[in-house]
Amino acid sequence: MESKIEVLSTVKIQNSPDLYKVVDALNRTLKHNDLMFGLALDQEDMDKAIFTIYRT
């Protein structure tokens, strides 16, 4: 069985120490809706984070 992940949206936002908690809550709450959320530091500007929404 093959799993395909589709990127629905990506946005660059100001990084915050607690931002990962929001992403974790979204992942725990909406995983049954086939949604997944990701967070990564922007390699060009470490004060920014890249937030991505995926459909699984």
Image (cartoon, rainbow, N blue to C red):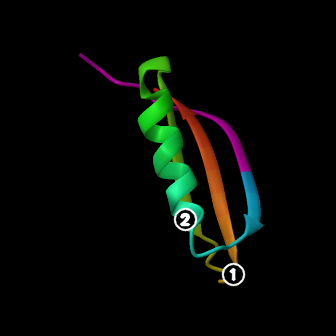
Foreground residue, 25 or 43? 25
Residue interval drawn in magenta: 1-10
**Amino acid marked by disc 2:** Ala
Q: Which residue is mark 1?
A: 44
Q: State the residue at coordinates (53%, 40%).
A: 26
Could you classify mark 1 by the number of other residues whose Cα lies within 10 Å: few (under 14), some (14-19), or many (20 or more)?
A: few
Image quadrant containing the C terminus: top left
Q: Secondary structure at mark 2?
A: strand
Q: Is residue 2 left or right of residue 18?
A: left
Q: Secondary structure at mark 1?
A: loop
**Above or below, 26 relative to 1:** below
Q: Return the x and y of residue 53 as percentages of the image width and height.
A: 61, 40
Q: Which residue is mark 2?
A: 40
Q: Return the x and y of residue 11 as percentages of the image width and height.
A: 75, 53
Q: Return the x and y of residue 32 as percentages of the image width and height.
A: 42, 20
Q: Does 29 appear in magenta? A: no
Image quadrant containing the N terminus: top left
Residue 17 appears in which quarter of the rendering? bottom right
**Amino acid marked by disc 1:** Glu
Mark 2 vs mark 1, CA separation in Å: 12 Å
